[in-house]
Amino acid sequence: MPEPRYDVLGIGNAIVDVIARADDDFLVRHAMRKGTMSLIVEDQAEHIYETMGPAVEISGGSAANTIAGVASFGARAAFIGKVKEDTLGRVFIHDIRAAGVAFDTPPAQEGPSTARSYILVTPDGERTMNTYLGAAQNLGVADIHVEAISAAAITYLEGYLWDPQNAKDAFLEAAAIAHDAKRRVALTLSDAFCVDRWRGEFLELIRSGTIDVLFANEAELHSLYQTSDFATALAILRQDAELAVVTRSENGCVVVTRRKTEAVPAFPVGRVVDTTGAGDLFAAGFLFGLARRQDHVTAARLGALAAAEVLQHLGARPETSLKALAQENGLPVLITPNPRGPGHGQAQGRLRRELRNASRRRRDDERRRHAAGFLCRGSRRRSSPGRGHHIPQSRCETAARRTAGRIGAGRLAAALPARA
């Protein structure tokens, strides 16, 4: 399998977030369910925008936020999502490329406008999202880049893609391409109400092995297994999923495999400003660690660090380098895998060992020759005791040079002395 070109490639809704502060009364007046995401039509979007307070516009989208976080760790990241050729579409394209993410999906020239999510943040930091999918819901199989997905160590998909049928088809196509290339596929369940809508199909994705890595929060896990008991839901998840991570807000997370369950604490946060993107950035850190072959606990700690960073400011993308933050906190940030191909480092290690062994064998041969009274140095010759003939250097080298047949003459050449 060739070395990946990307550590993580995300596929999801390309959305611009419009974020404003609001009180609980505003949510009640507009019949919004606090802490959830609701899909709205364009007329509703315009009404919410007219009635909400001062807002800031920041490129968002669940998977896009995750991929921006992956890039902030210094990883190689790519994203596939659909925007329209309009003002917000150009904002999204600029922002994701500026974050260091490869983005090549051509914008739509006609049809609905670029997607936007109106996010109301209450004083407790909780976010309530009202999302107009617009052009994002027109993502389809034609937008799936076979070569890019085949070249990504992990393809990451968001549960929100399961709502429009053409995006669902693109989701399944991407998963099949990734598995054909022997790569991993990860899914975030996205939202408890999204799970309510598609519970049976999500369970089938997990149990069939279409998904290799699952992300969920506690509410999504309870919805998935229709139980209020966390331990019961976790036990079923352990049977169903190859690898899953359940985030638990200030209680950290639980990493679940079929062999064991490991709890990892959250990073301390001085003050929660905005919970938008906390789950997205947790997934960024975990996926980064997984792609760079870290153990699950270390990957979860990277996720917890990224989530803590985004909780402390408005918006769903990091405002500081996650790579630098990880280094400051003693967490590993691996270098990009060797571009000379998989196994190159191991092959070089074997060659060094072979050369050391060849050198050791030469020294052993030389000690045996000394014991017999022979000495060969450069062009000098010495008679053996009691004998009247000379031993040429070429015969002294014979034993060492025979090893060339075992490890290759070219590899041994640097270890052998030059002939006089």
Image (cartoon, rainbow, N blue to C red):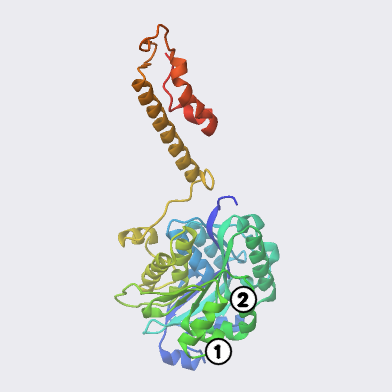
Q: Is residue 39 visible?
A: no
Q: Position of residue 369 (x, y in %)?
A: 38, 21
Question: Label for residue 176?
Answer: none
- Density class for disc 2 (Cα within 10 Å; few <14, some 14-19, many ≥20) is some
> In this figure, which residue is indicated by the disc labeled 2?
207
Q: Tell me which label, 2 or 1, sits earlier in the chain.
A: 2
- Against 68, residue 18 (above or below) is below
Splitting the image into 4 quarters, where does residue 188 fall? bottom right
> In this figure, which residue is indicated by the disc labeled 1?
226
Label 2, label 1: how far apart the Cα atoms are: 16 Å
Residue at the front extreme? 386
Residue at the left extreme? 270
Task: Write the residue at 39% across / 56% down.
Answer: 333
- Against 28, residue 250 (above or below) is above
Q: Position of residue 76 (x, y in %)?
A: 50, 55
Q: Secondary structure at mark 2?
A: helix
